[in-house]
Image (spheres, rainbow, N blue to C red):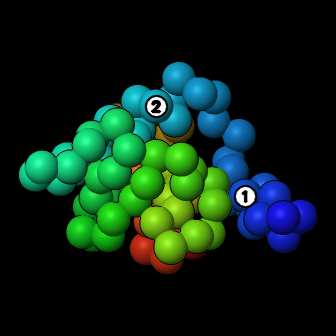
Amino acid sequence: MANRTHEKAELDEGFNDTIVEAVWRKGEILPGGDPDNCRKDSCGAWIDRDQYGVSAENGWAIDHIIPVSQGGTDNLNNLQPMHWKNKKV
C-alpha cells in the first residue's frame, strides 16, 4: 500500500479538487458507460475517475496540451485528462 501512495505522489501535480473534476469532465464519455466513473483520454485509453494520480491500469493525470515549458498555462482550456502512460513528459 505504501508503494501506491508513492506512485500517486509522482503523478499528483497539486491541482485542487475543482480543477481535477473539471478536467475529468473533458474526457470522452463511453457509450453505455457510467461517465462519473469511466471515460477515455484523447488517445483512446480508458481512465477511471478514482484512479487520478495513480499509475494503475486505468490511472490518469492532468496533461498540459501546450507544455508549460513552451508557454502553456494551468488554464482549464490548456488541460486534459490523460492516461499516465500517454502523458507527455
In terms of image quadrants, where is residue 83?
bottom left
Front residue of 6 and 77:
6
Q: Earlier in the sequence, mark 2 or mark 1?
A: 1
| Total marks in image | 2
Residue at 41% x, 38% y is 23
Relative placement, left or right, of 38 versus 8 is left
Answer with left or right where residue 49 lies relative to residue 9.
left
Residue 67 can be seen, yes or no: no
Kind of element beneath mark 2: helix
Give the residue drawn at x 24%, y 69%. Answer: 44
What's under tag 2, amino acid-wise?
Answer: Glu
* Residue situated furthest right in the rendering: 2
- Asked whether disc 2 touches disc 1, contact meaning CB atoms under 8 Å apart, the reply is no
- Spot the residue most to the left: 31
**Closest to the observer, 78 or 41:** 41
Q: Residues within 10 Å of mark 1 (few under 14, many from 20)?
A: many
Position of residue 45 in the picture relative to residue 85 (left or right): left
Name the residue that disc number 1 marks. Answer: 8
Residue furthest top as drawn: 18
In depth, the one of 67 and 50 nearer the eye is 50
Which quadrant of the structure image shows residue 14?
Answer: top right
Is residue 62 in view from this perspective?
yes
Gap in angstroms between the C-alphas marked 2 and 1 = 17 Å
Q: Which residue is mark 2?
A: 21
Q: Position of residue 69 (x, y in %)?
A: 58, 58
Write the residue at 58% across / 70% down: 56
Q: Quadrant of the C terminus?
A: bottom right
Residue 86 placed where, x, y %? 43, 73
